[in-house]
Amino acid sequence: MDNIQKKGGSHGKSSEGSSAQHRAHSPNNDLSEDGYSRDRADTISQGDLKLLDGEKVQATAKEVTYLCPFSGPVHGILQITNYRLHFKADDDPPFTVEVPLGTIYRVEKIGGTTSRGENAYGLELYCKDMRNLRFAHKQENHSRRLVYDKLMIYAFPATSSKPFFAFTYKERFDNNGWDIYDPEKEFQRQNVPNECWQITRINEKYELCDTYPALFAVPASVSDEDLKKVATLRSRERIPVLSWVHPKNSASITRASQPNAGLVGKTRNKDDEKYFQAILETNARGHKLIIMDARPKINALANQAKGGGYEMQENYQNTELVFLDIANIHVMRESLRKLKDICYPTIDDVHWLTNLENTHWLDYIKVILSGAVKIADAVDRCRISVVVHCSDGWDRTSQLTALAMLLLDPYYRTIEGFEVLIEKEWTSFGHKFQQRYGHGDKNHADDQRSPVFLQFIDCVWQVTKQFPCAFEFNEHFLITVLDHLTSCLFGTFLYNSECQRAKEDVKVKTVSLWTYINTRLTEFKNPLYAPHLHQHVLFPVASMRRLDLWTRYYIRWNPTMQPQESEEQRSRELHFLCEQLRQKCEELEREIMARTSVEVPSTPDAMSVNSNQSQQWAQSSAV
């Protein structure tokens, strides 16, 4: 995982087998006879471990063996802080293994007091970043119990009633990433409000819908009283609201949850039908409204028995209902489990393609990406407004709207724009990050966990592979976002809604991930980015023949899969070279402008002199 150091330091990944420069252990470590210690609270450095502001070592265990699945047992020292686990091998040259505690979702004890044999007694850690880490302890050192207890406290703060480390992290930066997204500013960029759309503050205190943002846009013809009536028919009161409007043809993308329709013919809401007509009328060129239901139709039918369902076309005039066949969170969770099984720790080369196919992971990536392309095509080429929803409107809906907006709007392909996109379509609209990724919760069997956001980032990576010059950010940027999705170092992905984050005062008490990223933009920039060539809509090919497994994320811990040279370093070098060439081009352009700005003389003698100068310039240019 990423190891964040003091401002101006590096942000490098430490993995199994990665070497680290040896440093002497700090004299502040007061090791006791049982092999571990509690370190001083004001310690800044513990040997090779550079502590963050607010980070404190909670336990240190000597004579621990890391059971590396690639190179075999490695002896060293294990340290647990209130933020991470850090293992440093005794070997020369030594290497380190490190993981933020927020990334651990399960801790199991291996062996008991009667266990015999080398390395039969210890701990196994299951991580959200595709790793399992196993450490053997010596029974006579009694270190396993302390390490286990500290892990259970600091890896699962929600269960142990402790604050997330993000509230303890006190690093200071030169910018404030919380300012990157201003909903009113983003609406203004889309020319909203206008004669068709208005910004409403009906949810300013989160009373209409506690999983929606305080500010959102709705059709200008709709009153707040109308919104309250519509909310009664929508699951979780998540009414259709504006996500994006096309700057040229006025077609829009709106998002919602499923209607509480119930069994066919039993429930009908005139207010909801009238509201959909108002959305249609915001697009003067549109003759109909397409409702993109992310679910398979059979799932939508099953939801009718539970009081949910979908819009009946005979009740909603001038609408077309399309089911996108994206499976639910439980199917996706099982698919990721299968993918992890074939990627870590060993890879079966002989049956790799068969095993990968059996996970269906790329099949689901294809379906999600295909749905986003359909939305983008309807809005841009067909000039038809689209309403997107799934069941509750915070999982598959966010995937589809965010991806479609990424394809439609080149602003979201910049680093700033992508940060705004995540804040807007994911965090503010109530994607349940804490529940889907189990932040601080030791209940690893919770069936509400699912890799929804991971699939979105995977889809983004697939698009960057097909359009390598259309994005300002690079692959390292996407991996960094995913690493800190679970690290709990920043407040960006904590809790399940904007309302909860406001209640916990997250923007004041924690640092935003965008704060960190925006202080070191060069690391995350794509040197091939050519914005002037990619102001158009992107239509990636959502076909299995064009999709790949993202090996640099899913299999990055396997030493045999790591590149021989650092792609981050190569990217920085290319970016530096591009900047040099860009500066040279600007200098040449200024020189050309200076030459062409010479006034044409009116006298014959002056014209002769000017002609001679022009010939000299032409000769020098030819040389």
Image (spheres, grey):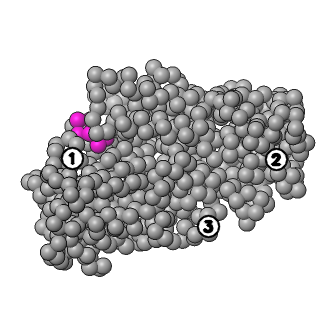
* Eye-nearest disc, 1 or 3: 1
As helix, strand or loop, the secondary structure at mark 2 comes to loop
**Is 475 placed left or right of 447 in the picture?**
left
Q: Earlier in the sequence, mark 2 or mark 3?
A: 2
Q: Residue at x 87, y 40 (%)?
A: 267
Q: Residue at x 61, y 64 (%)?
A: 500
- Identify the disc placed on residue 68: 1
The x, y position of residue 142, in whole percent, is: 21, 68
Choose between 249 and 377: the one closer to the eye.
377
Structural distance between the alpha carbons of marks 1 and 3: 42 Å
As helix, strand or loop, the secondary structure at mark 3 comes to helix
As helix, strand or loop, the secondary structure at mark 1 comes to strand
Which residue is disc 3 drawn over? Answer: 502
**Is 29 placed left or right of 133 in the picture?**
left
Residue type beneath disc 1: Cys
Q: Is residue 353 magenta?
A: no
Q: Residue at x 62, y 69 (%)?
A: 503
Structural distance between the alpha carbons of marks 2 and 1: 54 Å
Q: How many marks?
A: 3
